[in-house]
Amino acid sequence: MTDPVPRALPRPSPAQRWLALVLVSVAMFGNYYVYDAFGPVVDLLREQEGFTYDQISMVFSAYSVAAVVVLLIGGYVIDRWGTKRSIALFAAICLAAAALMASTARFETMLAGRFLLGIGAEPLIVAATAALAKWFKGKELSFAFGINLSIARLGSASADWSTSFASGLYANWQDPLWLATGVATVGLTAAMLYWMVEARLEGRVDLGEAAATDRLELKGMYAFSASYWYIVGLCVVFYSTVFPFRAFAIDYFQQAHGLARETAGMLSSLLPVAAIIVTPLFGLWVDRVGRRSLFMAIGSLAMLPLFLLVTYAPPGPDIPMPFTDGTRVPLTLLVVMLMLGGVFSLIPAVMWPAVAYIVRESRLGSAYSMMTLCQQVGVALVPLVVGRFNTAFGAGPEHPAGYAPGMWFYTALAALGLLFSYLLWRAESGPAAHGLEYPSGEKPA
Ligand SMILES: NCCCC[C@H](N)C(=O)NCC(=O)O
Protein backbone atom coordinates (compact mmCIF):
# COMPACT_ATOMS: atom_id res chain seq x y z
CA MET A 1 0.00 0.00 0.00
CA THR A 2 1.33 3.44 -0.83
CA ASP A 3 1.09 6.41 1.54
CA PRO A 4 -1.71 8.80 0.62
CA VAL A 5 -0.41 11.95 -1.10
CA PRO A 6 -0.94 14.88 1.31
CA ARG A 7 -3.67 17.13 -0.07
CA ALA A 8 -3.02 20.86 -0.35
CA LEU A 9 -5.10 22.83 2.14
CA PRO A 10 -7.56 25.43 0.83
CA ARG A 11 -6.84 29.14 1.33
CA PRO A 12 -9.05 30.78 4.01
CA SER A 13 -12.53 31.66 2.82
CA PRO A 14 -13.55 35.35 2.53
CA ALA A 15 -15.63 35.04 5.71
CA GLN A 16 -12.66 33.60 7.61
CA ARG A 17 -10.32 36.32 6.31
CA TRP A 18 -12.72 39.14 7.21
CA LEU A 19 -13.33 37.68 10.66
CA ALA A 20 -9.57 37.69 11.25
CA LEU A 21 -9.38 41.29 9.99
CA VAL A 22 -12.19 42.48 12.28
CA LEU A 23 -10.65 40.86 15.37
CA VAL A 24 -7.11 42.13 14.66
CA SER A 25 -8.50 45.60 13.91
CA VAL A 26 -10.48 45.76 17.17
CA ALA A 27 -7.23 44.92 19.01
CA MET A 28 -5.59 47.82 17.13
CA PHE A 29 -8.54 50.11 17.96
CA GLY A 30 -7.86 49.46 21.65
CA ASN A 31 -4.15 50.13 21.14
CA TYR A 32 -4.68 53.53 19.46
CA TYR A 33 -7.46 54.52 21.91
CA VAL A 34 -5.19 54.01 24.91
CA TYR A 35 -2.33 55.93 23.20
CA ASP A 36 -4.59 58.94 22.61
CA ALA A 37 -6.58 58.79 25.87
CA PHE A 38 -3.82 60.74 27.63
CA GLY A 39 -4.25 64.02 25.68
CA PRO A 40 -7.76 64.85 26.95
CA VAL A 41 -6.74 64.56 30.64
CA VAL A 42 -3.62 66.76 30.45
CA ASP A 43 -5.37 69.83 31.91
CA LEU A 44 -6.93 67.74 34.70
CA LEU A 45 -3.58 66.27 35.68
CA ARG A 46 -2.16 69.78 35.82
CA GLU A 47 -5.06 71.28 37.75
CA GLN A 48 -5.99 68.41 40.08
CA GLU A 49 -2.65 66.69 40.60
CA GLY A 50 -0.18 69.53 40.08
CA PHE A 51 1.64 67.96 37.12
CA THR A 52 3.93 70.37 35.28
CA TYR A 53 4.22 70.48 31.48
CA ASP A 54 7.71 68.98 31.88
CA GLN A 55 6.26 65.97 33.70
CA ILE A 56 3.40 65.58 31.21
CA SER A 57 5.84 65.52 28.30
CA MET A 58 8.10 63.02 30.06
CA VAL A 59 5.10 60.71 30.51
CA PHE A 60 4.21 61.14 26.82
CA SER A 61 7.81 60.49 25.71
CA ALA A 62 8.17 57.34 27.83
CA TYR A 63 6.11 55.50 25.17
CA SER A 64 8.64 56.32 22.47
CA VAL A 65 11.65 55.45 24.63
CA ALA A 66 10.11 51.99 25.16
CA ALA A 67 9.24 51.78 21.46
CA VAL A 68 12.90 52.30 20.52
CA VAL A 69 13.91 49.44 22.85
CA VAL A 70 11.27 46.98 21.63
CA LEU A 71 11.81 47.84 17.97
CA LEU A 72 15.29 46.39 18.44
CA ILE A 73 13.97 43.10 19.90
CA GLY A 74 10.21 42.92 19.18
CA GLY A 75 10.57 41.08 15.86
CA TYR A 76 12.28 38.16 17.60
CA VAL A 77 9.35 37.69 20.01
CA ILE A 78 6.84 37.60 17.15
CA ASP A 79 8.91 35.13 15.13
CA ARG A 80 9.34 32.89 18.17
CA TRP A 81 5.81 33.08 19.59
CA GLY A 82 3.85 33.29 16.35
CA THR A 83 1.24 35.91 15.54
CA LYS A 84 -1.68 34.55 17.57
CA ARG A 85 0.17 34.41 20.90
CA SER A 86 2.07 37.65 20.23
CA ILE A 87 -1.08 39.66 19.49
CA ALA A 88 -2.69 38.44 22.72
CA LEU A 89 0.51 39.02 24.71
CA PHE A 90 1.00 42.58 23.45
CA ALA A 91 -2.72 43.43 23.85
CA ALA A 92 -2.48 42.17 27.47
CA ILE A 93 0.54 44.45 28.03
CA CYS A 94 -1.48 47.40 26.64
CA LEU A 95 -4.28 46.58 29.08
CA ALA A 96 -1.85 46.37 32.02
CA ALA A 97 -0.34 49.70 30.93
CA ALA A 98 -3.75 51.39 30.72
CA ALA A 99 -4.72 50.10 34.18
CA LEU A 100 -1.40 51.22 35.66
CA MET A 101 -1.87 54.74 34.32
CA ALA A 102 -5.42 54.92 35.65
CA SER A 103 -4.50 53.54 39.07
CA THR A 104 -2.75 56.52 40.62
CA ALA A 105 -1.57 60.00 39.73
CA ARG A 106 1.96 59.38 41.03
CA PHE A 107 4.33 60.71 38.40
CA GLU A 108 6.59 57.63 38.52
CA THR A 109 3.61 55.27 38.12
CA MET A 110 2.32 57.23 35.14
CA LEU A 111 5.78 57.14 33.61
CA ALA A 112 5.98 53.36 34.12
CA GLY A 113 2.47 52.89 32.67
CA ARG A 114 3.23 54.88 29.54
CA PHE A 115 6.58 53.05 29.14
CA LEU A 116 4.73 49.72 29.43
CA LEU A 117 2.29 50.93 26.76
CA GLY A 118 5.21 51.47 24.37
CA ILE A 119 6.43 47.93 25.15
CA GLY A 120 3.04 46.49 24.15
CA ALA A 121 1.64 48.84 21.53
CA GLU A 122 4.47 49.15 19.00
CA PRO A 123 5.08 45.37 18.60
CA LEU A 124 1.29 44.87 18.52
CA ILE A 125 1.25 47.01 15.36
CA VAL A 126 4.03 44.84 13.86
CA ALA A 127 2.30 41.58 14.90
CA ALA A 128 -1.04 42.74 13.47
CA THR A 129 0.66 43.53 10.15
CA ALA A 130 2.31 40.10 10.09
CA ALA A 131 -1.01 38.38 10.90
CA LEU A 132 -2.90 40.18 8.14
CA ALA A 133 -0.15 39.27 5.67
CA LYS A 134 -0.81 35.57 6.43
CA TRP A 135 -4.57 35.77 5.86
CA PHE A 136 -4.64 38.17 2.92
CA LYS A 137 -1.47 37.29 1.01
CA GLY A 138 -2.30 37.18 -2.69
CA LYS A 139 -5.78 38.61 -1.94
CA GLU A 140 -6.88 42.10 -0.90
CA LEU A 141 -3.74 42.74 1.19
CA SER A 142 -3.37 46.53 0.70
CA PHE A 143 -7.10 47.00 1.20
CA ALA A 144 -6.97 44.94 4.41
CA PHE A 145 -4.02 47.01 5.70
CA GLY A 146 -5.97 50.19 4.87
CA ILE A 147 -9.08 49.01 6.75
CA ASN A 148 -6.94 47.96 9.69
CA LEU A 149 -5.25 51.39 9.93
CA SER A 150 -8.59 53.19 9.51
CA ILE A 151 -10.16 51.23 12.39
CA ALA A 152 -7.05 51.95 14.48
CA ARG A 153 -7.36 55.67 13.70
CA LEU A 154 -11.04 55.47 14.67
CA GLY A 155 -9.65 54.50 18.09
CA SER A 156 -7.65 57.78 18.13
CA ALA A 157 -10.73 59.79 17.09
CA SER A 158 -12.89 58.02 19.70
CA ALA A 159 -10.46 58.99 22.46
CA ASP A 160 -10.93 62.64 21.37
CA TRP A 161 -14.71 62.19 21.08
CA SER A 162 -14.87 60.71 24.59
CA THR A 163 -14.72 64.35 25.79
CA SER A 164 -18.29 64.58 24.40
CA PHE A 165 -19.88 61.14 24.63
CA ALA A 166 -18.34 60.49 28.08
CA SER A 167 -18.19 64.11 29.24
CA GLY A 168 -19.50 63.10 32.68
CA LEU A 169 -16.26 61.19 33.31
CA TYR A 170 -14.13 64.30 32.89
CA ALA A 171 -14.91 65.60 36.38
CA ASN A 172 -11.59 63.98 37.32
CA TRP A 173 -8.47 62.78 35.48
CA GLN A 174 -8.92 59.15 36.50
CA ASP A 175 -12.29 58.05 35.12
CA PRO A 176 -11.42 58.72 31.45
CA LEU A 177 -8.33 56.56 31.92
CA TRP A 178 -10.46 53.79 33.43
CA LEU A 179 -12.64 54.08 30.33
CA ALA A 180 -9.46 53.59 28.27
CA THR A 181 -8.71 50.51 30.38
CA GLY A 182 -12.19 49.21 29.49
CA VAL A 183 -11.50 49.79 25.79
CA ALA A 184 -8.16 47.98 26.17
CA THR A 185 -10.09 45.05 27.70
CA VAL A 186 -12.26 44.92 24.58
CA GLY A 187 -9.03 44.96 22.52
CA LEU A 188 -7.59 42.08 24.54
CA THR A 189 -10.86 40.12 24.18
CA ALA A 190 -10.66 40.54 20.40
CA ALA A 191 -7.01 39.40 20.52
CA MET A 192 -7.97 36.26 22.49
CA LEU A 193 -10.79 35.51 20.04
CA TYR A 194 -8.29 35.94 17.20
CA TRP A 195 -6.00 33.43 18.93
CA MET A 196 -8.93 30.94 19.09
CA VAL A 197 -9.82 31.50 15.42
CA GLU A 198 -6.24 31.07 14.20
CA ALA A 199 -5.68 28.01 16.41
CA ARG A 200 -8.95 26.42 15.21
CA LEU A 201 -8.24 26.96 11.53
CA GLU A 202 -4.55 26.01 11.62
CA GLY A 203 -4.18 22.70 9.84
CA ARG A 204 -7.56 23.16 8.13
CA VAL A 205 -6.71 26.09 5.88
CA ASP A 206 -3.46 27.22 4.31
CA LEU A 207 -2.36 30.22 6.34
CA GLY A 208 1.15 29.98 4.95
CA GLU A 209 4.10 31.16 6.94
CA ALA A 210 4.13 34.71 8.18
CA ALA A 211 6.98 36.47 6.43
CA ALA A 212 9.91 37.02 8.76
CA THR A 213 8.97 40.02 10.86
CA ASP A 214 10.49 43.39 10.03
CA ARG A 215 13.75 43.46 11.89
CA LEU A 216 16.50 45.92 12.18
CA GLU A 217 19.75 44.68 10.69
CA LEU A 218 22.27 47.47 10.94
CA LYS A 219 24.61 45.68 8.51
CA GLY A 220 24.54 47.46 5.16
CA MET A 221 22.58 50.53 6.32
CA TYR A 222 25.36 52.77 4.96
CA ALA A 223 24.50 51.51 1.48
CA PHE A 224 21.01 53.09 1.53
CA SER A 225 20.82 56.01 -0.87
CA ALA A 226 20.61 59.68 0.08
CA SER A 227 16.93 59.65 -1.00
CA TYR A 228 16.16 57.05 1.69
CA TRP A 229 17.76 59.20 4.40
CA TYR A 230 15.89 62.31 3.20
CA ILE A 231 12.61 60.37 3.61
CA VAL A 232 13.73 59.24 7.09
CA GLY A 233 14.51 62.88 7.93
CA LEU A 234 11.07 63.97 6.78
CA CYS A 235 9.43 61.10 8.70
CA VAL A 236 11.21 62.11 11.91
CA VAL A 237 10.33 65.79 11.78
CA PHE A 238 6.79 65.17 10.50
CA TYR A 239 5.74 62.71 13.24
CA SER A 240 7.77 64.58 15.90
CA THR A 241 5.59 67.58 15.10
CA VAL A 242 2.19 65.97 14.62
CA PHE A 243 2.10 63.40 17.46
CA PRO A 244 3.29 65.77 20.23
CA PHE A 245 1.04 68.57 18.90
CA ARG A 246 -1.90 66.14 19.09
CA ALA A 247 -0.94 65.09 22.62
CA PHE A 248 -1.08 68.70 23.83
CA ALA A 249 -3.80 69.94 21.45
CA ILE A 250 -6.90 69.55 23.64
CA ASP A 251 -5.19 71.21 26.61
CA TYR A 252 -3.79 73.94 24.32
CA PHE A 253 -7.20 74.76 22.78
CA GLN A 254 -8.69 74.98 26.27
CA GLN A 255 -5.94 77.08 27.87
CA ALA A 256 -4.83 79.33 25.02
CA HIS A 257 -8.12 79.72 23.13
CA GLY A 258 -10.67 79.26 25.94
CA LEU A 259 -12.51 76.38 24.23
CA ALA A 260 -14.64 73.91 26.20
CA ARG A 261 -13.13 70.43 26.49
CA GLU A 262 -15.83 68.90 24.24
CA THR A 263 -15.16 71.46 21.51
CA ALA A 264 -11.40 71.03 21.83
CA GLY A 265 -11.83 67.24 21.57
CA MET A 266 -13.96 67.58 18.43
CA LEU A 267 -11.40 69.89 16.86
CA SER A 268 -8.50 67.57 17.71
CA SER A 269 -10.39 64.57 16.25
CA LEU A 270 -10.32 66.24 12.81
CA LEU A 271 -6.79 64.88 12.30
CA PRO A 272 -7.53 61.15 12.59
CA VAL A 273 -10.95 61.58 10.96
CA ALA A 274 -9.43 63.32 7.93
CA ALA A 275 -6.79 60.61 7.74
CA ILE A 276 -9.44 57.84 7.77
CA ILE A 277 -11.26 59.38 4.83
CA VAL A 278 -8.57 61.09 2.77
CA THR A 279 -5.41 58.95 3.14
CA PRO A 280 -6.71 56.12 0.88
CA LEU A 281 -7.84 58.69 -1.71
CA PHE A 282 -4.41 60.34 -1.77
CA GLY A 283 -2.87 56.86 -2.04
CA LEU A 284 -4.96 56.06 -5.13
CA TRP A 285 -4.26 59.46 -6.69
CA VAL A 286 -0.49 59.28 -6.19
CA ASP A 287 -0.43 55.74 -7.62
CA ARG A 288 -1.91 57.27 -10.79
CA VAL A 289 0.09 60.43 -11.14
CA GLY A 290 3.41 59.75 -9.34
CA ARG A 291 5.17 62.98 -8.30
CA ARG A 292 5.72 61.57 -4.82
CA SER A 293 8.57 63.83 -3.70
CA LEU A 294 6.68 66.85 -5.04
CA PHE A 295 3.62 65.87 -2.96
CA MET A 296 5.79 65.44 0.14
CA ALA A 297 7.20 68.95 -0.48
CA ILE A 298 3.66 70.35 -0.93
CA GLY A 299 2.56 68.69 2.34
CA SER A 300 5.60 70.11 4.19
CA LEU A 301 5.01 73.58 2.73
CA ALA A 302 1.32 73.49 3.73
CA MET A 303 2.32 72.59 7.30
CA LEU A 304 4.82 75.44 7.67
CA PRO A 305 2.49 78.36 8.57
CA LEU A 306 -0.09 76.40 10.60
CA PHE A 307 1.46 76.65 14.08
CA LEU A 308 2.04 80.37 13.69
CA LEU A 309 -1.51 80.87 12.40
CA VAL A 310 -3.00 79.28 15.55
CA THR A 311 -0.71 81.47 17.64
CA TYR A 312 -0.95 84.88 15.98
CA ALA A 313 -3.87 85.00 13.51
CA PRO A 314 -7.13 86.56 14.75
CA PRO A 315 -9.60 83.79 15.71
CA GLY A 316 -12.27 84.99 13.25
CA PRO A 317 -15.99 84.34 13.71
CA ASP A 318 -17.30 81.24 15.49
CA ILE A 319 -18.77 78.90 12.90
CA PRO A 320 -20.52 75.51 13.25
CA MET A 321 -18.24 72.50 12.80
CA PRO A 322 -19.29 70.16 10.00
CA PHE A 323 -20.78 66.80 11.03
CA THR A 324 -21.51 67.87 14.63
CA ASP A 325 -24.70 68.98 16.38
CA GLY A 326 -23.75 72.59 15.75
CA THR A 327 -20.61 72.84 17.92
CA ARG A 328 -19.13 76.26 17.09
CA VAL A 329 -15.40 76.88 16.74
CA PRO A 330 -13.31 79.90 15.71
CA LEU A 331 -12.84 79.87 11.93
CA THR A 332 -9.02 80.11 12.11
CA LEU A 333 -8.73 77.03 14.35
CA LEU A 334 -11.08 75.06 12.10
CA VAL A 335 -9.16 75.98 8.95
CA VAL A 336 -5.79 75.19 10.57
CA MET A 337 -6.97 71.79 11.85
CA LEU A 338 -8.54 70.91 8.48
CA MET A 339 -5.27 71.80 6.75
CA LEU A 340 -3.25 69.82 9.30
CA GLY A 341 -5.68 66.92 8.75
CA GLY A 342 -4.99 67.18 5.01
CA VAL A 343 -1.23 67.10 5.62
CA PHE A 344 -1.64 64.20 8.07
CA SER A 345 -3.46 62.35 5.28
CA LEU A 346 -1.12 63.26 2.43
CA ILE A 347 2.38 62.79 3.82
CA PRO A 348 1.91 59.27 5.33
CA ALA A 349 0.01 58.13 2.22
CA VAL A 350 3.02 59.03 0.07
CA MET A 351 6.00 58.68 2.39
CA TRP A 352 5.70 55.08 3.65
CA PRO A 353 5.10 53.49 0.22
CA ALA A 354 7.89 55.66 -1.29
CA VAL A 355 10.49 53.64 0.65
CA ALA A 356 9.59 50.57 -1.42
CA TYR A 357 10.77 52.43 -4.55
CA ILE A 358 14.13 53.27 -3.07
CA VAL A 359 15.19 50.20 -1.10
CA ARG A 360 15.41 46.70 -2.56
CA GLU A 361 12.82 44.24 -1.29
CA SER A 362 15.17 42.10 0.79
CA ARG A 363 16.18 45.17 2.86
CA LEU A 364 12.69 46.67 3.22
CA GLY A 365 12.17 45.22 6.72
CA SER A 366 15.36 46.86 7.97
CA ALA A 367 14.59 50.09 6.13
CA TYR A 368 11.12 50.42 7.72
CA SER A 369 12.41 49.41 11.16
CA MET A 370 15.19 52.02 11.00
CA MET A 371 12.67 54.65 9.84
CA THR A 372 10.28 53.84 12.73
CA LEU A 373 13.15 53.79 15.19
CA CYS A 374 14.35 57.26 14.12
CA GLN A 375 10.71 58.43 14.17
CA GLN A 376 10.32 57.31 17.78
CA VAL A 377 13.59 58.96 18.86
CA GLY A 378 12.20 62.24 17.49
CA VAL A 379 8.77 61.69 19.06
CA ALA A 380 10.52 61.04 22.39
CA LEU A 381 12.65 64.20 22.29
CA VAL A 382 10.34 66.87 20.86
CA PRO A 383 7.68 66.86 23.62
CA LEU A 384 10.44 67.27 26.19
CA VAL A 385 11.56 70.45 24.44
CA VAL A 386 7.99 71.75 24.05
CA GLY A 387 7.20 70.88 27.70
CA ARG A 388 10.38 72.76 28.77
CA PHE A 389 9.33 75.81 26.73
CA ASN A 390 5.78 75.74 28.15
CA THR A 391 7.09 75.55 31.71
CA ALA A 392 9.90 78.07 31.20
CA PHE A 393 7.63 80.64 29.53
CA GLY A 394 4.80 80.16 32.04
CA ALA A 395 2.24 78.93 29.49
CA GLY A 396 -1.29 78.78 30.85
CA PRO A 397 -4.71 80.44 30.61
CA GLU A 398 -3.36 83.59 32.29
CA HIS A 399 -0.44 83.74 29.88
CA PRO A 400 -1.37 82.18 26.49
CA ALA A 401 1.69 83.85 24.90
CA GLY A 402 3.77 81.31 26.85
CA TYR A 403 2.74 78.67 24.28
CA ALA A 404 4.31 80.64 21.42
CA PRO A 405 7.93 79.33 21.80
CA GLY A 406 6.65 75.73 21.50
CA MET A 407 4.75 76.70 18.34
CA TRP A 408 7.90 78.31 16.91
CA PHE A 409 9.72 75.06 17.62
CA TYR A 410 7.09 73.07 15.69
CA THR A 411 7.45 75.60 12.87
CA ALA A 412 11.24 75.13 12.81
CA LEU A 413 10.68 71.35 12.55
CA ALA A 414 8.21 71.88 9.70
CA ALA A 415 10.84 74.02 7.93
CA LEU A 416 13.34 71.18 8.33
CA GLY A 417 10.74 68.84 6.81
CA LEU A 418 10.44 71.20 3.84
CA LEU A 419 14.23 71.14 3.44
CA PHE A 420 14.30 67.31 3.47
CA SER A 421 11.50 67.08 0.92
CA TYR A 422 13.23 69.66 -1.30
CA LEU A 423 16.49 67.64 -1.15
CA LEU A 424 14.50 64.51 -1.98
CA TRP A 425 12.74 66.19 -4.89
CA ARG A 426 16.11 67.42 -6.23
CA ALA A 427 17.66 63.94 -5.92
CA GLU A 428 14.63 62.34 -7.57
CA SER A 429 14.64 64.82 -10.44
CA GLY A 430 18.21 63.90 -11.41
CA PRO A 431 19.89 60.94 -13.14
CA ALA A 432 19.99 58.81 -9.93
CA ALA A 433 16.17 58.94 -9.53
CA HIS A 434 14.33 55.81 -8.29
CA GLY A 435 11.02 56.42 -10.03
CA LEU A 436 9.25 58.31 -7.22
CA GLU A 437 8.00 60.89 -9.69
CA TYR A 438 6.40 58.28 -11.97
CA PRO A 439 2.95 56.63 -11.71
CA SER A 440 2.85 53.14 -10.11
CA GLY A 441 4.43 50.51 -12.32
CA GLU A 442 6.29 53.01 -14.50
CA LYS A 443 9.97 53.45 -13.74
CA PRO A 444 12.62 55.44 -15.53
CA ALA A 445 14.82 53.41 -17.88
N1 LIG B 1 -1.24 56.46 17.40
C1 LIG B 1 -0.42 55.43 17.91
C2 LIG B 1 1.03 55.61 17.58
C3 LIG B 1 1.37 54.94 16.29
C4 LIG B 1 2.84 54.90 16.08
C5 LIG B 1 3.23 54.14 14.86
N2 LIG B 1 4.62 53.77 14.98
C6 LIG B 1 3.06 54.97 13.63
O1 LIG B 1 3.80 55.88 13.40
N3 LIG B 1 2.10 54.68 12.78
C7 LIG B 1 1.93 55.42 11.54
C8 LIG B 1 0.76 56.34 11.57
O2 LIG B 1 0.68 57.19 10.63
O3 LIG B 1 -0.05 56.25 12.50
Image (spheres, grey):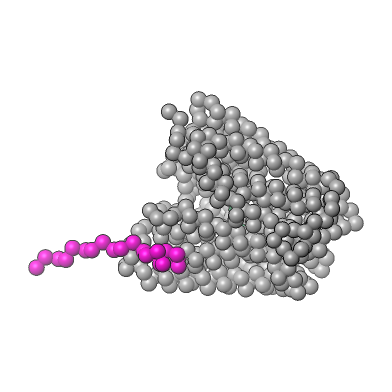
Q: In the shown orientation, is residue 375 left or right of residue 362?
A: right
> Where is residue 398, by image quadrant?
bottom right
The quarter of the rendering in which ligand 1 is drawn is bottom right
Q: Quadrant of the N terminus?
A: bottom left
Q: Position of residue 270 (x, y in %)?
A: 69, 56
Q: Position of residue 113 (x, y in %)?
A: 65, 65
> Where is residue 10, by image quadrant?
bottom left
* Range drawn in magenta: 1-20
Q: Judge whether residue 9 is colored magenta.
A: yes
Q: Quadrant of the C terminus?
A: top left
Q: Is residue 52 visible?
A: no
Q: In the shown orientation, is residue 327 left or right of residue 434?
A: right
Q: In the shown orientation, is residue 342 left or right of residue 80?
A: right
- 155 and 140: which one is in front? 140
> Where is residue 249, by image quadrant?
bottom right
Q: Residue at x 49, y 33 (%)?
A: 434
Q: Is residue 269 visible?
A: yes
In the image as oriented, which residue stretches furthest toward the left? 1
Q: Residue at x 76, y 63 (%)?
A: 326
Q: Judge whether residue 344 is colored magenta.
A: no
Q: Position of residue 50 (x, y in %)?
A: 82, 65
Q: Residue at x 54, y 53 (%)?
A: 71
Q: Residue at x 61, y 70 (%)?
A: 183
Q: Position of residue 54 (x, y in %)?
A: 77, 55
- 292 and 61: which one is in front? 292
- 372 and 444: which one is in front? 444
Determine the main secondary structure of the stretch shown in magenta. loop
Look at the picture and state if 351 lies above or below 32: above
